[in-house]
Amino acid sequence: MAMRAGIWIFLVALHVQAGNGQMVQMDSSKSGFVGSQVELRCIFINSNPPVKISQVTWQKLLNGTKQNVAIANPALGVSVLPPFKERVTFKQAAVRHRTPSLEDTTIVFSNLQLSDEAAYICEYTTFPAGNRENMVNLTVFARPMTRMTLTTPTIVARATKRKMTVATCMSANGKPTSVIKWDTRLKGEATFQETRNQNGTVTVRSNYVVVPSRETHKQKLTCIVTYRSERITDSVVLNVQYEPEVKIDGFDGNWYLKRPDVQLTCRADANPPVTIYQWKLLNGSLPSNVEIKNNTLFFKGPVTYDLAGTYVCDATNGIGTRPAVVDVNITEFPNNSLPGGPEIPQEQHNTGAIIGGAVVGVALLGVAAILLFVFLRRRQRTFKGDYSTKKHVFGNGYSKAGGLPVHPPMPKNLQYPDDSDDEKKPAQIGGPSGFEASEREFDGEQEDLKRPYFTVDEVESRDYDERTLAFQYDPQPEIADDMISQTDGSVISKKEWYV
Ligand SMILES: *[C@@H]1O[C@H](CO)[C@@H](O)[C@H](O)[C@H]1NC(C)=O
Ligand SMILES: *[C@@H]1O[C@H](CO)[C@@H](O)[C@H](O)[C@H]1NC(C)=O
Ligand SMILES: *[C@@H]1O[C@H](CO)[C@@H](O)[C@H](O)[C@H]1NC(C)=O
Ligand SMILES: *[C@@H]1O[C@H](CO)[C@@H](O)[C@H](O)[C@H]1NC(C)=O
Ligand SMILES: *[C@@H]1O[C@H](CO)[C@@H](O)[C@H](O)[C@H]1NC(C)=O
Ligand SMILES: *[C@@H]1O[C@H](CO)[C@@H](O)[C@H](O)[C@H]1NC(C)=O
Ligand SMILES: *[C@@H]1O[C@H](CO)[C@@H](O)[C@H](O)[C@H]1NC(C)=O
């Protein structure tokens, strides 16, 4: 009750043309979408002493001009005027009765049109109190058509690097006006355009403009349309076609004479994928010993000076052809400070050095322990055998590995015959088994352990140690093949044994 009274006072203050207790009660505003139906309320509050209602008139007020919509007269009946005849009715049947009740003259507006937006006046003509009226503002909304489109299903990145609209987002014929925003990681800019239609609706259109490129391929673009409190989102993923981006892998700057199994591979990033790879040598023809498989040039046989030159790979896709170039030069000797040679690979270099250092430390400790052990045991035993042969084992190891580069000033090369590249790798990392073999090998001969192999290496750089060890421990299989175990756990070369 108290609440009702409150509303009452509020209405009186705002919307009621008051006078001697009579008033017309209406909503202050109403809204509806195009095509929908809306009720415009109008209630006459009569009070003591009651007045007589002579007529009720609904009027449309637009631009200061009044237009009659509907009239209800107790004596003459009801009249709805064109152009409202088809769409406006009085809600209460009692309005149309022979002895009508005109207290509630609410009208129902159906199939709303944009042109219906206006203020509507409900006016009561009474006797003896005179006219009482009130007003409602009717707003008509039009839901926009929202859609997002790609400029074309596939966008082509041109070398000219011209900006282009890749996607368009449109919210058409909306009322009130929509707001368009973009959400994307794509670098670009949006243009906005608003077109106001005759009927009061607004079309908002936004273009997203980018320079299509490899980087824009597969990027997602989301358009966010805010219409009143609604959010409508739509996304597209760009499909950008671009020329191949080409590079040649395989030349590490360390192609030295006799290096085996070198190759050049042409790698391309392209959309659509590359269909043709073409190799050529600038100012010459490709060496006769190359084999081309797909995108790779295999050089058969060891490296010779003939391989030097500028190699070009042309990669072609549906958009275009792009080259990559590599200058191949051949050196006489490997460069051990570069990757790719008979060297540990670059990326393993640092860890390799650390591991190598640790390995050497552990090895030396182990050797020292074994030395001590062997020394003590030896004192209790008579030794039969010629341990000097073991030095030959090492010698054989070198020459067996072959390809000892004849280059005395570069001692590092000595440890790296051409074909030892792959073989030594497991030994570097899988040290422990290598050590066992070596320990056995060294077992028993104190003198050998003091030979330059270790003593020289120890004082040299860690890299050097590591390489040296790696190689020396490698010929483990040879031990198995060419060595014969001794009862004391040591081994002796078969050759020496049988000779
Ligand atoms: C109705 O709209 C008019 C102008 O459009 C405005 O001046 C008036 O205050 C509004 N009336 C109400 C009750 O909102
Ligand atoms: C109302 O007035 C505005 C300008 O104030 C005009 O653009 C519009 O056409 C008018 N509407 C009608 C229905 O007369
Ligand atoms: C408003 O006008 C536009 C442009 O003439 C039209 O496409 C749209 O359908 C109209 N909207 C309504 C609700 O009549
Ligand atoms: C290689 O050929 C190009 C043109 O085909 C020429 O300009 C250049 O001088 C040549 N270079 C050599 C080293 O022959
Ligand atoms: C290379 O070409 C052969 C046929 O010559 C084909 O079977 C193979 O799939 C191709 N490999 C690649 C990686 O393209
Ligand atoms: C060989 O080629 C590499 C890489 O292209 C370059 O860095 C180096 O200087 C060249 N060496 C000679 C001797 O031309
Ligand atoms: C080996 O390669 C390094 C790094 O590129 C370079 O500085 C050095 O001069 C090369 N050494 C030889 C002997 O070519």
Image (cartoon, rainbow, N blue to C red):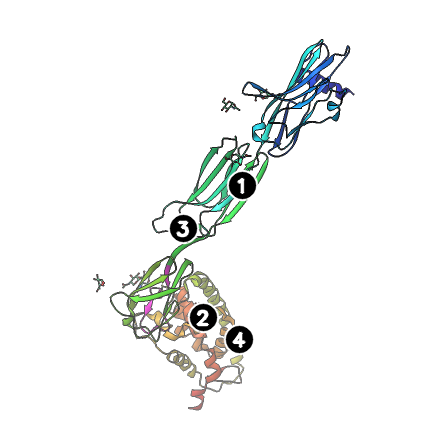
Residue at the far bottom: name it.
499
Q: Earlier in the sequence, mark 3 or mark 2?
A: 3
In three-dimensional space, the C-alpha distance between marks 3 and 1, rounded to whole angstroms, equals 28 Å
* Residue carrying label 1: 146
Q: Nearer the viewer, mark 3 or mark 1?
A: 1
Q: Amino acid at mark 1?
A: Thr
Q: Position of residue 109 (x, y in %)?
A: 65, 29
* Residue carrying label 3: 213
Q: Is residue 260 magenta?
A: yes
Region in magenta: 246-262
Q: Amino acid at mark 4?
A: Phe
Q: Can residue 84 be seen by looking at this rendering?
A: yes
* Residue carrying label 2: 425
The N terminus lies in which quarter of the figure? top right
Q: Amino acid at mark 2?
A: Lys
Which corner quadrant of the image does residue 37 belong to? top right
Q: Is residue 192 left or right of residue 131?
A: left
Q: Earlier in the sequence, mark 2 or mark 4?
A: 4
**Depth order, front residue of 215/234:** 234
> Circle 1 sits in a helix, a strand or a loop, which is it?
strand
> Circle 2 sits in a helix, a strand or a loop, which is it?
helix
Which corner quadrant of the image does residue 93 belong to? top right
Q: Is residue 374 above or below residue 242?
A: below
Q: Nearer the viewer, mark 3 or mark 2?
A: 3
